Image: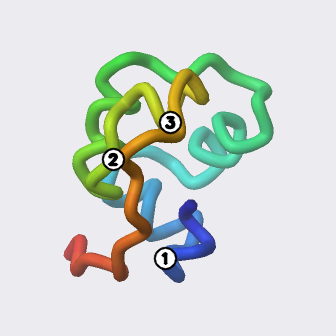
Amino acid sequence: MREDRDYTQKEIAEYLNMHTTQYQRYERGESTVPADIIVSLAKLYEVPSDYLLELSDEGVVLRQKKDIT
């Protein structure tokens, strides 16, 4: 989803207020993503958190990149 919206890992890490390395660990599945991060990403991508948790694929519409600066 990040790549579909043309965000870099660095941009998302900055949005989440963390180091890029930590965000990369989340993407690779090396670290468990805390609930507050899931909520922040769901808001950014305008999708239900269930979609990010791979519990649902209903009601998701891919949207364009938002300005996160």
- Reply above or below: 52 against 10: above
Cα separation between marks 1 and 3: 15 Å
> As rendered, which of 21 and 29 lies closer to the eye?
29
What residue is shown at x 37% (from left), y 30% (from top)?
49
In the rendered image, the quadrant that contains the C terminus is: bottom left
Q: Do residues under tags 1 and 3 come within 8 Å of each other at their CB atoms? A: no
Q: Quadrant of residue 40?
A: top left
Q: Which residue is mark 1?
A: 5
Cα separation between marks 3 and 2: 8 Å
Where is residue 20 shown, x and y percent of the image?
Answer: 57, 54
Dot 2 falls on a residue whose secondary structure is: loop
Q: Do residues under tags 2 and 1 come within 8 Å of each other at their CB atoms? A: no
Q: Tell me which numbered mark, 1 or 3, is placed earlier along the sequence.
A: 1
- Give the amino acid at mark 2: Val
Dot 1 falls on a residue whose secondary structure is: loop
Q: Do residues under tags 3 and 2 come within 8 Å of each other at their CB atoms? A: yes
Where is residue 56 shown, x and y percent of the image?
Answer: 51, 29
Dot 1 crowding, Cα within 10 Å, few <14, some 14–19, many 20+ = few
> As rendered, which of 58 and 32 lies closer to the eye?
58
Where is residue 24 shown, x and y percent of the image?
Answer: 68, 47
Q: Which residue is mark 3?
A: 52
Dot 2 crowding, Cα within 10 Å, few <14, some 14–19, many 20+ = some
Cα separation between marks 2 and 1: 13 Å
In the rendered image, the quadrant that contains the N terminus is: bottom right
Q: Which residue is mark 2?
A: 47
Q: Tell me which numbered mark, 2 or 1, is placed earlier along the sequence.
A: 1
